[in-house]
């Protein structure tokens, strides 16, 4: 793989699943001449398809929980995704410094923590609400990283959406489920930071495959303790493989293809739509209807995420 392709792969890993564009992520994939406007429909469709895959994969995971439990689903997803990525990437394990391995370990731990907490959340509250609360983690990271006063406005708008979603108190949502979703958002922010660092230290998707394997090892005892031999039921493994492909392998591939022609800021804005996609998946797959207030709350958080990203774009353009 040449240097250009490696840069693109690092950008894909950095931007994966994030609702915000951090300065380091944008640096990994600068806009090409006319990149954001000409022929953007194809890459946009790839990103939207990736988002649909992730959230509908999460909906399938909820259906799998009665069979394997939340922790069992996380274990199946990470193990099976790791197997696929290791087989495809075949990463080398020699020639790396201790700091490189430390980054991979931190990335894998953040990945495992994010998944464990998120699936604990969707086991208790609707999928759309869980993703809306989770997306606050990357949003806060964007506000802190940009250090621009205007982003406080977007943070306030997001906070208003959360207040609406909770109905004035998280008891309507289930306090523990909401707490798990917020904690998953904090781990999502850590995931973004260590994803960027891993992308700079490892070629192609090698670091991602290794981190996924480490995250799978971390969650294995939890999954075995909760589900035991149920993890070995063929139909459960089949559904787990579907979750792994839909929530990990397929989105990474689609996003990598999209980022070859799509600027990272535009990518991040599109990823801000994930709460709406999650709510749609919850409605069609899990029959989780949203009230008008819930829909407005999700719209406010989406608007805040998009505003936080767009407020960073003029500054970067001016420094070119």
Image: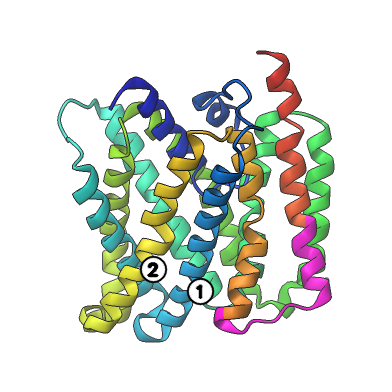
Q: Position of residue 96 (x, y in %)?
A: 22, 27
- Work out which residue is located at the far top of the displayed protein and give it: 320
**Pointer 1: what residue?**
59
Q: Residues within 10 Å of mark 1 (few under 14, many from 20)?
A: many
Does the stretch in magenta take in 295? Answer: yes
- Work out which residue is located at the far front of the displayed protein and give it: 39
Query: Which quadrant: the N terminus?
Result: top left
Residue 196 appears in the rendering: yes
On the image, which quarter does residue 249 sit in? bottom left
Q: Position of residue 297 (x, y in %)?
A: 79, 64
Q: Which residues are magenta?
A: 285-300
Pick the residue in front: 48 or 25.
48
Residue at horizontal 78%, vertical 51%? 303
Q: Secondary structure at mark 2?
A: helix
Q: Secondary structure at mark 1?
A: helix
Residue 215 against residue 219 in the figure, above or below: above
Residue 212 against residue 104 in the figure, above or below: below
Q: Is residue 40 left or right of residue 75?
A: right
**Pointer 2: what residue?**
243
Residue 124 against residue 186 in the figure, above or below: below
The kind of secondary structure the magenta stretch mainly shows is: helix
Residue at horizontal 82%, vertical 31%? 149
Pick the residue in front: 232 or 274.
274
C-alpha span from label 1 to label 2: 9 Å
Q: Residues within 10 Å of mark 2 (few under 14, many from 20)?
A: many
On the image, which quarter does residue 4 sit in? top left
Query: Which quadrant: the C terminus?
Result: top right
Task: Tell me whether the residue at label 1 lies in contact with that at label 2, contact meaning CB atoms closer than 8 angstroms.
Answer: no
Pick the residue in front: 155 or 22.
22
Does the stretch in magenta take in 1? Answer: no
Number of the label disc, if any, that sits on residue 7: none
């Amino acid at each position: 793989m040449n240097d250009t392709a490696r840069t693109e792969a690092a950008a894909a890993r950095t931007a994966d699943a994030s609702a915000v564009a951090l300065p380091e992520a944008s640096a990994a994939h600068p806009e090409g001449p006319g990149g954001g406007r000409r022929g953007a429909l194809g890459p946009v469709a790839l990103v939207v398809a990736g988002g649909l895959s992730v959230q509908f994969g999460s909906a399938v995971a909820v259906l799998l929980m009665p069979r394997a439990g939340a922790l069992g689903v996380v274990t199946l997803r990470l193990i099976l995704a790791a197997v696929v990525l290791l087989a495809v990437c075949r990463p080398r394990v020699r020639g790396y410094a201790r700091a490189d391995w430390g980054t991979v370990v931190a990335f894998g731990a953040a990945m495992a923590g994010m998944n464990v907490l998120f699936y604990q959340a969707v086991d208790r509250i609707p999928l759309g609400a869980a993703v809306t609360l989770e997306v606050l983690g990357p949003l806060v990271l964007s506000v802190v990283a940009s250090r621009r006063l205007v982003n406080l406005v977007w943070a306030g708008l997001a906070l208003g959406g959360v207040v609406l979603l909770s109905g004035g108190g998280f008891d309507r949502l289930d306090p523990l489920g909401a707490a798990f979703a917020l904690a998953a958002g904090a781990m999502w922010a850590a995931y973004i930071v260590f994803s960027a660092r891993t992308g700079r230290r490892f070629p192609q998707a090698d670091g991602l495959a290794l981190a996924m394997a480490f995250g799978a090892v971390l969650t294995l005892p939890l999954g075995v303790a909760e589900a035991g031999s149920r993890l070995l039921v063929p139909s459960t493994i089949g559904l787990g493989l579907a979750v792994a492909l839909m929530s990990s392998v397929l989105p990474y591939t689609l996003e990598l293809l999209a980022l070859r022609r799509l600027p990272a800021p535009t990518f991040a804005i599109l990823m801000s739509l994930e709460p709406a996609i999650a709510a749609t998946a919850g409605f069609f797959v899990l029959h989780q209807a949203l009230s008008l207030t819930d829909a407005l709350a999700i719209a406010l958080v989406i608007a805040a995420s998009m505003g936080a990203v767009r407020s960073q774009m003029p500054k970067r353009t001016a420094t070119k």
